[in-house]
Image (spheres, coloured by chain):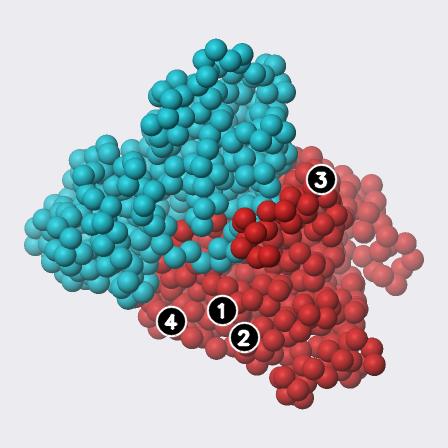
Amino acid sequence: MAEIDILAQQLRSALGDGAVISDWQRRRTYECDGLAQYKVTPALVVVAENAEQIAETVRACDQASVPFVARGSGTGLSGGALPHADGVLIVTSKLRRIHEIDWVNLRAVVEPGVINLDVTKAATPYGYYYAPDPSSQQVCSLGGNVAENSGGAHCLKYGFTTNHITGIELITPRGEKVQLGGKAPDVPGYDLLGVVVGSEGTLGIATEITLRLTRSPETVRTLLAGFSSTDDAGAAVSAIIGAGVIPAAIEMMDALAIEAAEAAVHCGYPAGAQAVLVVELDGPAIEVAHAVDEVQRHCREHGSEEIRIAKDDGERALIWRGRKSAFAAVGRISPDYIVQDGVIPRTALPEVLQRIRDLAQAHGVRVANVFHAGDGNLHPLVLFDDAIEGQAERAEQLSGEIVTLCIEFGGSITGEHGVGADKVKYMQLMFTDDDLDTMQLVRCAFDPDGLSNPGKVFPTPRMCGEAPRRHRVALDSQKTDLTGRP
Amino acid sequence: MMVPGQRDQPIPSFGDRATEVRNAVLADAVAGVAPRWVATPHSTKEVASVLKAANEQGLAVVARGTARRLSWGQPPNRVDIVLDTTSLSGVIEHVAGDLVVAVGAGTRLDELQSVLARAGQRLALDGEHGDSTIGGLIANAVSGPSRLLYGTLRDLLIGVTFVRGDGVIAKAGGKVVKNVAGYDIGKLLHGSWGTLAVITEAILRLHPVPPAQRWVTIQVDDPSRTGELVQRVLHSQLVPTAIELDRTPSGSSLLTVMLEGIEAGVRTRADSVSILLGNGAVSSESQPDMWGKPPAAAGDYLLRLTTEVAALPLLLDAVTEASGATGLPMHIRGSVGVGSMLASLPSDASSDKIGAFLDTLRRKSNRWGGTVVVLDAPLPVVRSIDTWGPVQALDLMRSVKVGFDPARVLSPGRFVGGI
Ligand SMILES: Cc1cc2nc3c(=O)[nH]c(=O)nc-3n(C[C@H](O)[C@H](O)[C@H](O)COP(=O)(O)OP(=O)(O)OC[C@H]3O[C@@H](n4cnc5c(N)ncnc54)[C@H](O)[C@@H]3O)c2cc1C
């Protein structure tokens, strides 16, 4: 019997038949995440019912030296949950219990399969919400958010997932259950939680998550400003931030993105605008009123001729609908597209957008821009038609050049979607071998056999004993001293 | 205390001749342990040379900024070289428009703040830390009252350059606030007490200096009443920057709420806070005397107490009880809005009594979900007390340490579990 069949049998008797999927057609439905251009059918799928089953599965994988990959809702955009052909895909989507909305402590405790927006829904009656709000928040899981350190429009003011997670229960790649952090702050020892958040499932599987709840603001005002160029809109963003105003969100869309959104959801953005800014301000009423004035002034000074302020929740929702539907909407004006996620310093916005236009023209490829302007996180959507020969290659080439451009301006290859399988090839643009080795030292501490989501994040995954070899030697000779293990 | 420095020995050079090295003197001792030399590197590369040499020669190194917290933790098992970081100083790049600054780890906080102030910006770390270096503040995870709104350096550190214990130079993060490429090693170094790497440069997220500030203070001695008032402010929509408690050994307590923003807004919000706090609340434009200062006098025991925010009264009651049982008076001061406070016990407390005090608190600490850590304690008592208490995931931490610093060059013995 093949090794994987033995493992399947073993897991079936431990977890019950229902949890283990061997059938090829059913396994195949898990072949990709939100980035469908990468496809791998996993050797086995486990749909766990609870944390204990995840621990059992990981322990079995560890014993059999079989790789495993965690999967939440599968909406990741970097191939992070791409299965391993010889490995087990561990699906958390049945772990959907919200254990506690402990608002008096400003905390909630949830299972990893809980949907992001469901936390906010459960906390809203008490006047609280969960701040990090990826555009996919109606479907993505907290486990996936933790793994990707997901961001969202409101992270400009409120920070990213990592700033809102105070504890996790983790099944380490060796199958041990550890608690990192909790409801109280400043836990003694190294901040392992801080490294696990954003480690893209390479340090184990989170089975319980303690997160921070944020008090709903007294006032929220949402404003839409049309501009005659992205340069003007970019300058307005700089002016707003330069004036000391920190909006909850500042999002930008260019003409092509506006056109797509308009066609899809009729959001009624200013006609003829070459760029729009969606600016949201929240907080105590007096402060917000002042900030709204400031924002309007700066938008006008930078050439905005049409500014709309949402009068009610309906108008506010409409403004956001245009922004939030943008990715899907672009799908209507182009059969295929690549989403990039590079980050640049905010002050470089006008220059970088110009360079992207130049590159797009040179390649004869269209690019729509929809992005988190406040923190310089670009989402250029590179449009192509796979049916037309050569277009996919050109789009891929342009997309790579945009990433390089972001690095040239001192930015990052990814602001929120993660490295996954897709951006592994760019990691060396940003980091030296020693930088990457250092990260892998942490990997080796958690996962010496490299079983947890192998092939992601690191371009040259190394055996822990391999490079640099002296670590391993030193580690072995010191084990009794430092780890207490023989 | 051991006698420092074999003075007649020739002063070695550690790989890089440019690095200043001198013999150590008595004042260079680290928690009573005498080093042999003090090396003052001027660059990340020079730091790497010192650490490489230390690895080759089996020497132990303790990084030192302005030595404000050098006595924290257990005394190191051994120290050969004190690595003085104060020449790794200065603002490397301040891009005001991006609200980001890159700074040498040996730069003093007050120097950094004065450069930033010229652009109307600040690092959102308040408290009495001006004469500390950025590297030291990160390494010891030092925070101030405004962490309620802005978080700690953990949240503000977006990029870091460092030299691992094994002498390898590396970096993580970068110059942009939003960045998920690779592991967030900065968070691992924050609060690592110099046992994994020497931080040489930090890139920090900044905030604008708000036009106005106000403090609303009320005297509130009863623990459950204190807890109730903290809850009221915390669950309001008034967005306080800080909620601090200052509780003397006699139980006399001042609760202070800090507000920041535009002048008109701050005044209105301060009035609302005053109403929430009730009779006796006083609103002022100047900060209370104790603001952001540690509760301990030089030589006292300094502890960190944490709690789930709503369980504060349980912690305060337990402290009163432990004080009653041991006769040790405790002064508590800190961020009750986030559940992390500093506390002091008198310098002349015996190790038995300290042990009993810690036991009493730790045995019950699951009731408020917090931890009790001794940050600083007088010699030689510190060696006989369990300064850290229970630590989660210690095996993983040990493995991380082995990876970064396989020869245990950096501050051996100072950290959790003897790391
Ligand atoms: C239309 C659309 C819009 C989006 N908008 C945003 C946005 O605004 N901001 C943003 O940041 N992202 C966005 N995303 C990307 C994606 O939604 C996020 O990365 C999300 O966090 C993924 O969650 P998931 O549950 O789908 O995770 P998956 O895709 O299933 O997995 C993602 C990664 O997490 C790991 N993982 C999953 N669960 C666990 C666990 N319990 N423990 C450890 N590792 C685990 C997986 O192994 C994988 O590496 C968007 C995606 C789409 C399709």
Q: Colour of chain A?
A: red
**Residue ID at (44%, 44%):** B415
C-alpha gap between disc 1 and disc 4 = 14 Å
On screen, A449 above or below B29?
Answer: below
Quadrant position of residue B235: bottom left
Q: Are marks 1 and 3 on the same chain?
A: yes
Residue type highlighted by circle 2: Ala
From the viewer's side, name the closer residue of A254 and A185: A185
Say whether disc 3 or disc 2 marks the residue closer to the N-terminus.
2
Q: Chain of mark 1?
A: A
Residue at label 3?
A433
Residue at label 2?
A51
User: Could you tell me residue A318's position as x and y percent?
Assistant: 52, 64
Q: Are marks 2 and 1 on the same chain?
A: yes
C-alpha gap between disc 3 and disc 2 = 36 Å
Secondary structure beneath disc 1?
strand
Quadrant position of residue A103: bottom left
Q: Colour of chain B?
A: cyan
Quadrant position of ligand 1: bottom right
Residue at label 4?
A101
